[in-house]
Amino acid sequence: MQPLARFGGWLYAAAFNLMERPMLAIQRLVGVRNVAWAFLLPNLVIFGLFTFVPIFLNFMYATTGGDQLLLWERPGVGAENFATLLDCQNYLDPNTCQRDLFWRAVHNTGWFVVLQVVFMVLFALITALILNKNLPLRGFFRAVFFYPVLLSPVVVALIWKWILQRNGVLNAGIEGVGGSPINWLIEADWAFFWVVFISIWAHMGFYVLILLAGLQAIPADVYEAAEMDGGSKWRVFSRITMPLLMPTMVVVLVLSLIRAVQAFDEIYVLTGGGPGSATTLLLQYIYDTGFAERPRLFGLAAAASILMAAVLFALTLLQLRATRGQAEGR
Amino acid sequence: MLGFLTRTRGRRRADLTDWLAWGFLLLGVLLMLGPVLWIVLSSFKTEAALQEYPPTLLPLATETVVVEGHAEPLPLFRVTEGEHAGRVLAQVRRVGLVAQMIDPADPATRIDVNIAAREPVREVDVATENYTTLFSRFNFLLYFWNSTFITVVATILTVLFNSMAAFALSKYKFRGRTVVFLLIIATLMIPPTINLVPIFLVVSQLGLVNSPWGVIWPAIATPTGVFLLRQYMLTIPDDLLDAARMDHASEWRVYWRIVMPLSAPALAVLVLFSVMWRWNEFLWPLIVLNRAEEFTLQLALNSFQGELQTSWSNLLAMTVLTLLPITIVFAVLQKYITQGIAQAGVK
């Protein structure tokens, strides 16, 4: 470790020496106050190139057609991309839509978001409440529940694919107790169930941590006062814990909603959106349309992502209102 | 032991809710760690043992023996019934319900045994070749290097650029400061997933498709990082900076020699986040890196599972090696990671 630390220190000093002269020259040129812009420059250039400019380019893609990547080679089509995406006789039945796959993805995403968020927040709350008790090994349990959050989505998908395959350990267990094996990822309803289950498994720990932090911010004397008044456990929970935890709950709810709308990685590796299109979510539709399939319909993908952005924007505004409410509540 | 497990705060006895809590926690541990342990155990099984159904817990395999006159090693069986009961024989082939077997010590005589009257001789067989072939046949080191390169370079640049911006935004009063800060914060609302097509245009115009830099550059100006570091740097007293300026320190020296070392705790949190983000990133590399020699570990795993549906042995080993670095980092820094995430509220 020692040589490594020394090498790190040497690198740190070398980087300092390398940049000192140019930065000093800039400082002499523009003055101490404006040197701030020199510090901001690298970050702003990258923000500009990869965030700000793309926002506008996205609208230009959405209003042009064809499969060319270069914008000046793409013919303008106005709002046609949006029109085809939204062309539907009955929005509740994807088969009546011109882009039926898009609407199937919208439906799947809707169900996924509702089920995943509701059950994940519920289980995260139960876990956080239990971990908030003064139990032995609390640190260990907290770490265990958090561990899957760190695993890469591909690893998560492969771990479960191995368990769920036809000759996997789950089917062996079911046969062991006398049940009949199921093709978990080939039957549409089961595949959807596992997609929801696995994304809860992979992300719950993060929300447990946030809720736990919220629970520990509730002062202990509030509980002591309630105990002295002889309130039952349920009464303490419903009258004290929940109201005081509400701001954290709202943040957790909105954060998990925003994440769920953009779900892609684990699901794509686990099922590839199948069987059929049973587990194709919105982001996978965008990826498939714009990148995976030929011809690459960049315009349609951009239009779909703008529609997704609108949903995310609304959710973020909700979050801002919620966090402001939280700040004022204190 | 039971007294230890049922101990609660205060001296009262454990009640029903405590038992329910323990049940929930133990079930949770099983559910959270079980799948990972299962894949680690499975990764040490031979391809033949992986095909077995129902699967065994430990990596067991049928013992084999090399007999003169037979090219392939022959599986060993223990005969359970009949006149040869108790002998250990090698099976040459199976014909219907009859197994043709020989004694390895006396390969000339053939012995016919009913297949129901024998059971395989099992031994624990740790298939380390699942791992070693990753290095000899599957270019694992190349993918590992690609992932490491992207993770390390992107993390260094993220910390450098974000801390420079945070320094400017927290320690200087200049026109446009609020506007810049709000612009950066506003990008929190615009996740890269909604700009995939135009970011791909920028990356391809810069000639970075199929280059690790095409993954690195779009990722490093994180609004989360700027925000996290700025909030921390605001707590560093300006007097310290002014004292250094009195001694004719340049602004770069103030930043590098005073503000950076004092921000170490916040920088550490950002390093952890960045390593986690870049090591696990999937969708953007999937779009930018199309050539196998540029694949990250995650992409290699993904394409591997598509090609080799049946060769689980190497796939499982590769999965374990991919989750290993993050697991080690977590085991060592568990406390700091959970604290950092609870404080920052980001992932």
Image (cartoon, coloured by chain):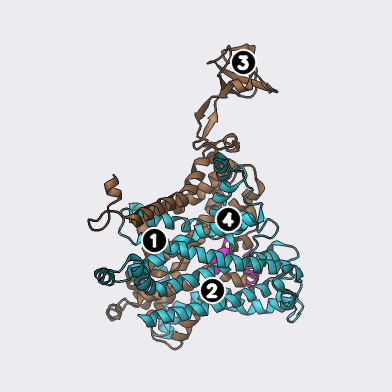
Chain colours: A cyan, B brown
> SS class of the residue under badge 4?
helix
Q: Nearer the viewer, mark 4 or mark 1?
A: 4
Name the residue that disc number 3 marks: B102
Left or right of B346 on screen, residue A164: right
Name the residue that disc number 2 marks: A46
Q: Amino acid under label 3?
A: Ile
For the residues labelled 4 and 2, the Cα–Cα distance comes to 38 Å
Dot 3: chain letter: B
Q: Amino acid under label 1?
A: Ile
Name the residue that disc number 4 marks: A194
Q: Label 4 neighbourhood size at 10 Å, few (<14), some (14-19), many (20+)?
A: many
Name the residue that disc number 1 marks: B337
Q: Nearer the viewer, mark 2 or mark 3?
A: 3
Dot 2: chain letter: A
B140 or B252: nearer the eye?
B140
> SS class of the residue under badge 2?
helix
- Magenta stretch secondary structure, dominant: helix
